[in-house]
């Protein structure tokens, strides 16, 4: 599997990188850490480039390299990259330009496959979308952005599953909340949930919500299937069949000490664009990390 | 599939909106007193402004659209559009962008660093005064982004020599970087070669038969204003970003050592300076005969012949898209004049102002300056002058004062990151925030308008 972790800065992206690497390790996945720098206006792009060439002569790094350097330090400290790579130090000289506004460096990893560090510049949604589709990533991990519509656009337009690391505190014990319904994305969400619960060694709350209190046979089938998988994988779990508004119930049940895992909405993209979807509303309102599985 | 279409639509929404607005306007009747060609020229202007501000498509694409729409909408013949596209002002913009690449690539920044430090010593306020003055002085001759590109390594070295911890330099960093960016922006009004927009205004004066201003004649009007602005800008920046460090003793010492390591001035450095000096002499003494643009191109030719720059480097670092855009903007500006759109717009503005007051001499000036100042923070400053110039010159009043006021107001690009390449260059360092531009920019904007108003009164006695 391939995971993409988007980082912004040392100040805000520590939790995202930490939990991202832990989850990626659980999946034995290869990891790419990406920093997307600001979009340079076309009026100024040549002048900015020319200035950066001068700055390189004075041994200044391109903006954004310091974030990759910090990510390298984090990976080294937590032994995600091989000691031989760590010993050589941050290889900024091997940051190779690959295409317009994109530089990349490979590092030999210790878990899963190798780790790559990528620096891109431009509109964050377009750049991540391009990276996900060209790199065929399975999961994209991002921090909880304050920017309006950022989560909406990423969930709507990225081809991969999305893990939004909202307010994650690594010192706190988390449980897993897997939302189960009769949509076809649920079974993949449960499989992802099992891997995450094994990695974090935590219990699972299987939550199924009905507005009326009556659960159709599809719901029961989905819950039974999830329970069978959890039993087989020896993951401790509790099942909750609850009545009410799904978003309110999931928010209340999750509190701030769960990681929520749920399938993506199966609604028509046009309806999702204008009216949103349950996963999107949960990402916006729940003060905890949310993994939306596609 | 549907998801991809929605994504494309969201990315291109401003493009689609501009097409929609253009199409609706096309099918409406043209306003009374405005020719059909003039009306269609204004439709292109509205569409182009939306596309330049929001950049939903590449800017060279906007330039091409401005050109082919003139023919498709029946405004002018293909050959006439081509003729209006290329002029000495566009030659100047092309030449000055290439001169910038030639000069910046020589690495004169270390010499500059040494000069600044010798001049200013190690007191922070002296260094800020030095940065603003030297940036302003140099940019008045060689253009703002050239100076910013050369000053950036010096400024960043001082900041990082003070401390690599951003918390320690959280005020010093924006203070020094804005000293460079705003100093360069202010300086660009000093001479015609300070910015493409100055040359565009000179071209309009000449094209419309209003005035013939020489290089030194321009300086006579603008340099006093520049000298007045420098101390005021230093005070504004100092009190906006009060630095934690009042003396940069060790940072300056380290900078001196770094510069010393780069060695003595080479013959190549000398030739670079001599060639630029020759270009400057050409601008002063020959530009009224052979044009500023031709002289700039001769300078680039000399740099190429003397082997100071390779064509591949010039080609790679020159923003050809911007040249296309300015050419197209000048072409539209000329169409606005030719079709009567500029006169109609100017009259409409005058009529609206007369509702407020019968005596519109001050209101007219305020309107022109505010409109230019606002647009320059959203569009590029040369594109602003290309579009606004013909309107302002038709608004009545002294065309020289109105023209100078507009050209100078287009340098008030202090408020946003995208306002000018200099603002974008310091932003790309990662050491200034978007909010910093507003924090210092609004004070600079108001100060500049007040100084310009005083100067416009003084110009009446010239």
Image (cartoon, coloured by chain):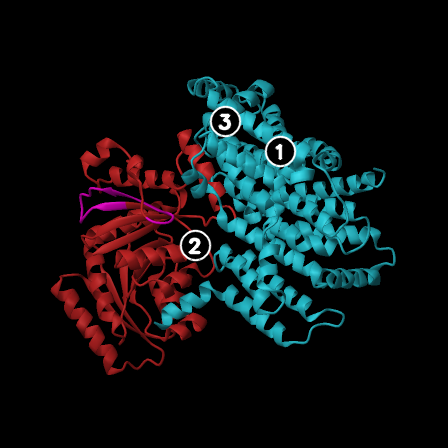
Chain colours: A red, B cyan
* Image mark 1: chain: B
For the N terminus of chain B, the quadrant is bottom left
Q: Are marks 3 and 1 in one subunit?
A: yes
- On screen, residue A96 versus residue A225, left or right, reads right
- Point out residue B287 in the picture as x, y percentages from the top left corner: 66, 37
* Residue extent of the magenta highlight: A99-116
Count of numbered badges drawn on the protein = 3
Crowd tier of the residue under label 3, counting other residues whose Cα lies within 10 Å: few below 14, some 14–19, many 20 or above: some
Q: Which percent across, then down, holds residue B186?
A: 65, 38
Asked whether A112 falls inside the magenta stretch, the response is yes
Q: Earlier in the sequence, mark 3 or mark 1?
A: 3
Q: Name the spot of residue A222 as percent of width and height, x first.
A: 22, 75
- Label 1 secondary element: helix
Q: Is residue B26 above or below residue B249?
A: below
Mark 3 element type = loop
| Marking on residue A123 | 2
Check contact, mark 1 vs mark 2: CB within 8 A.
Answer: no
Q: Nearer the viewer, mark 2 or mark 3?
A: 3
| Residue located at (47% from left, 32% from top) | B305
Q: Nearer the viewer, residue B192 or B312?
A: B312
For the point 75% across and 61% down, the residue is B343
Above or below — where is A264 with respect to B165?
below
Q: Which residue is mark 3?
A: B108
On screen, residue A203 above or below B372:
below
Dot 1 crowding, Cα within 10 Å, few <14, some 14–19, many 20+: many
Q: Is residue A268 left or right of residue B145?
A: left
**Which chain contains the residue that carries disc 3?**
B
Whether residue A253 is situated above or below residue B52 in the rendered picture: below
Say which quarter of the image contains residue A213. Answer: bottom left
Q: Mark 1 sits on what residue?
A: B141
Residue A27, position as x, y percentages in the image: 19, 55
In which quarter of the view is residue B78 placed?
Answer: bottom right
């Amino acid at each position: 599997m391939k995971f993409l972790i988007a980082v912004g800065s040392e100040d805000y992206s520590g939790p995202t990188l930490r939990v991202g690497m832990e989850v990626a390790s659980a999946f034995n996945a290869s990891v790419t850490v990406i920093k997307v720098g600001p979009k340079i206006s076309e009026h100024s792009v040549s002048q900015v480039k020319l200035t950066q060439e001068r700055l390189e002569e004075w041994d200044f790094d391109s903006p954004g390299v310091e974030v990759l350097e910090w990510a390298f330090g984090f990976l080294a400290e937590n032994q995600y990259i091989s000691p031989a790579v760590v010993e050589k130090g941050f290889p900024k000289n091997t940051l190779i330009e690959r295409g317009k506004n994109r530089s990349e460096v490979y590092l030999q990893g210790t878990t899963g496959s190798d780790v790559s560090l990528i620096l891109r510049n431009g509109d964050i949604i377009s750049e991540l979308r391009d990276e996900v589709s060209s790199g065929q990533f399975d999961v994209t991990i991002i921090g909880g952005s304050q920017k309006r519509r950022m989560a909406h656009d990423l969930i709507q337009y990225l081809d991969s599953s999305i893990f939004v690391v909202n307010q994650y505190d690594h010192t706190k014990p988390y449980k897993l909340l897997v939302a189960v319904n009769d949509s076809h994305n649920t079974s993949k969400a449960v499989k992802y949930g099992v891997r995450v619960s094994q990695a974090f060694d935590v219990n699972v709350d299987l939550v199924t919500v009905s507005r009326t209190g009556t659960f159709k046979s599809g719901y029961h089938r989905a819950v039974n299937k999830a329970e069978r998988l959890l039993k087989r994988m020896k993951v401790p779990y509790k099942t909750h069949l609850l009545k009410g508004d799904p978003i309110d119930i999931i928010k209340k049940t999750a509190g701030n000490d769960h990681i929520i895992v749920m399938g993506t909405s199966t609604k028509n993209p046009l309806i999702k664009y204008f009216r949103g979807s349950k996963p999107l509303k949960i990402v916006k309102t729940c003060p905890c990390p949310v993994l939306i599985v596609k | 599939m549907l998801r991809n279409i929605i994504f494309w639509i969201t990315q291109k929404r401003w493009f689609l909106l501009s097409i929609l607005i253009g199409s609706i306007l096309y099918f409406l009747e043209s306003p009374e007193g405005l020719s059909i060609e003039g009306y269609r020229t204004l439709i292109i202007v509205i569409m182009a402004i939306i596309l330049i501000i929001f950049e939903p498509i590449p800017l060279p694409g906007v330039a091409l659209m401005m050109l082919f729409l003139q023919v498709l909408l029946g405004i002018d013949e293909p050959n006439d559009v081509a003729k209006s596209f290329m002029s000495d002002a566009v030659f100047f913009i092309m030449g000055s962008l290439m001169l910038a690449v030639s000069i910046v690539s020589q690495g004169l920044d270390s010499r500059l660093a040494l000069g600044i430090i010798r001049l200013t010593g190690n007191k922070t306020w002296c260094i800020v005064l030095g940065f603003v003055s030297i940036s302003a002085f140099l940019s008045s001759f060689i253009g703002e982004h050239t100076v910013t590109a050369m000053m950036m390594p010096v400024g960043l070295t001082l900041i990082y020599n003070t401390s690599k911890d951003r918390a320690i330099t959280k005020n010093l960093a924006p203070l020094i970087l804005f000293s460079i960016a705003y100093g360069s922006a202010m300086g660009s009004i000093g001479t015609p070669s300070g910015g493409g927009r100055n040359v565009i205004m000179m071209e309009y004066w000449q094209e419309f038969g209003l005035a013939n201003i020489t290089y030194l004649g321009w300086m006579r009007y603008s340099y006093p204003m520049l000298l007045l602005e420098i101390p005021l800008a230093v005070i504004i920046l100092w009190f906006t970003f009060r630095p934690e460090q009042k003396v940069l003793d060790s940072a300056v010492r380290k900078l001196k050592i770094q510069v010393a390591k780069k060695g003595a001035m080479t013959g190549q450095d000398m030739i670079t300076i001599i060639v630029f000096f020759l270009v400057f002499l050409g601008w002063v003494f020959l530009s009224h005969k052979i044009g500023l643009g031709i002289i700039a191109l001769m300078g680039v030719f000399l740099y190429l012949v003397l082997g100071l720059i390779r064509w591949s480097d010039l080609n790679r670092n020159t923003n050809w898209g911007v040249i296309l855009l300015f050419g197209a903007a000048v072409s539209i500006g000329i169409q606005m004049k030719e079709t009567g759109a500029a006169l109609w717009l100017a009259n409409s503005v005058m009529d609206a102002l007369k509702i407020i007051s019968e005596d519109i001499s001050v209101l007219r000036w305020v309107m022109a300056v505010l409109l230019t100042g606002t647009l320059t923070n959203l569009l590029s400053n040369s594109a602003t002058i290309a579009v606004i110039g013909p309107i302002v010159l038709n608004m009545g009043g002294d065309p020289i004062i109105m023209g100078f006021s507009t050209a100078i107001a287009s340098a008030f690009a202090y408020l946003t990151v995208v306002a000018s390449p200099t603002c974008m260059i310091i932003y790309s360092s990662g050491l200034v925030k978007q909010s910093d531009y507003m924090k210092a920019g609004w004070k600079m904007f108001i100060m500049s308008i007040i100084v310009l108003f005083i100067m416009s009164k003084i110009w009446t006695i010239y």
